[in-house]
Image (spheres, grey):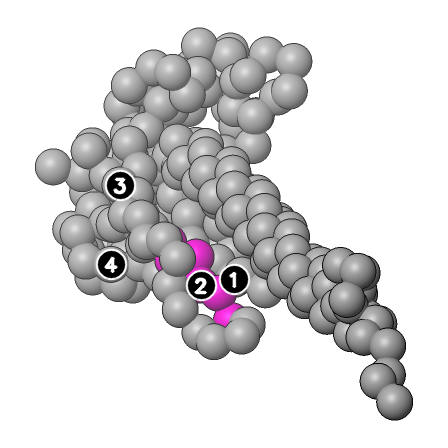
């Protein structure tokens, strides 16, 4: 006796739908993997953009600190500015202290950086120098072009005291004094491996008055 052929009339056996279902599952799985990969790449790209923006912002902050480095009082320091006036808070001749060695407390003026006269009230040698005269003492400070420069040390201290806006991304700010009054700043990633992302060298305006 002849058995009926399930496909004799052009119909499908149960095998064909199963094969089609398997193929759909494979395609769907591949699409999900592709979408997941694209999403991860997008997140990584956004994070990298955020890191670059944060580094640029921090560099601007560090440069702002370097711009306030001055030795016009006979002692090198990073000046504190009045938020309302933008002027340094130390005494100067143009702010009413006639005997001050600083001509001005305006950081936008060239006289802000180097002492323009001797403060006669200074009787003993200025710490770190052999002279009680502010211009002579700062000249001595300027002669030191090593990594222990008394001109640069206050800047290093001030920058190291700044908060690190990249700590959440496992990035540290490594700051050091280089010869010839250069401040080196390295932005270093520590996780998953240690690598340097950015290196900049900053010469503060004060250094230009040491020549």
Task: Single out the residue that lies furthest toward the front.
Answer: 1
Q: Does the magenta portion include 187?
A: yes
Stretch in magenta: 185-190
Q: Position of residue 59 (x, y in %)?
A: 44, 40
> Would you name the residue on which mark 4 appears?
178
> Would you name the residue on which mark 2 appears?
188
Figure quadrant of the C terminus: top left
Q: Residues within 10 Å of mark 2 (few under 14, many from 20)?
A: some
Q: Label 4: state its secondary structure.
A: strand
Q: Which mark is residue 172?
A: 1
Of marks 4 and 1, which one's residue comes earlier in the chain? Answer: 1
Nearer to us of marks 3 and 1 is 1
The residue sitting at 30% across, 43% down in the picture is 202
Of marks 4 and 2, which one's residue comes earlier in the chain? Answer: 4
Asked whether, in this view, residue 89 is left or right of residue 94, the answer is right
> Would you name the residue on which mark 3 appears?
203
Q: Does the magenta portion include 156?
A: no
Q: Label 3: state its secondary structure.
A: loop
Q: Label 2: state its secondary structure.
A: strand
Q: Residues within 10 Å of mark 4 (few under 14, many from 20)?
A: some
Q: Position of residue 123 (x, y in %)?
A: 37, 43
- In the depicted structure, whether residue 23 falls above or below residue 109: below
Asked whether, in this view, residue 181 is left or right of residue 173, the answer is left
> Answer yes or no: do the residues labelled 3 and 4 have beta carbons within 8 Å?
no
- Looking at this view, is 126 or 86 the one in front? 86
Kindly tell me whether residue 21 is visible in this rendering: no
Nearer to us of marks 4 and 2 is 2
Q: Label 1: state its secondary structure.
A: strand
Q: Position of residue 109 (x, y in %)?
A: 34, 15
């Amino acid at each position: 006796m002849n058995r009926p052929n399930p496909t004799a009339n052009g119909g499908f056996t149960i095998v064909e739908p199963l094969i089609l279902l398997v193929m759909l599952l494979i395609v769907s799985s591949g699409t999900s993997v592709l979408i997941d990969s694209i999403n991860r790449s997008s997140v990584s790209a956004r994070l990298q953009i955020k890191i670059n923006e944060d580094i640029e912002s921090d560099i601007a902050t560090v440069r702002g600190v370097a711009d306030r480095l001055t030795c016009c009082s006979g002692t090198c320091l990073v000046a504190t500015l009045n938020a309302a006036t933008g002027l340094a808070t130390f005494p100067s001749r143009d702010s009413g202290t006639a005997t001050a060695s600083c001509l001005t407390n305006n950081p936008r003026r060239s006289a802000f950086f180097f002492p323009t006269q001797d403060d006669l009230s200074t009787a003993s040698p200025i710490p770190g120098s052999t002279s009680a005269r502010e211009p002579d003492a700062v000249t001595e400070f300027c002669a030191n072009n090593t990594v222990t420069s008394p001109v640069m040390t206050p800047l290093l201290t001030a920058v190291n005291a700044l908060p690190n806006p990249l700590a959440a991304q496992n990035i540290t700010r490594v700051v050091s004094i280089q010869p010839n009054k250069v401040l080196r700043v390295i932005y270093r990633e520590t996780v998953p491996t240690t690598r340097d992302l950015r290196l900049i060298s900053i010469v503060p305006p004060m250094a230009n008055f040491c020549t």
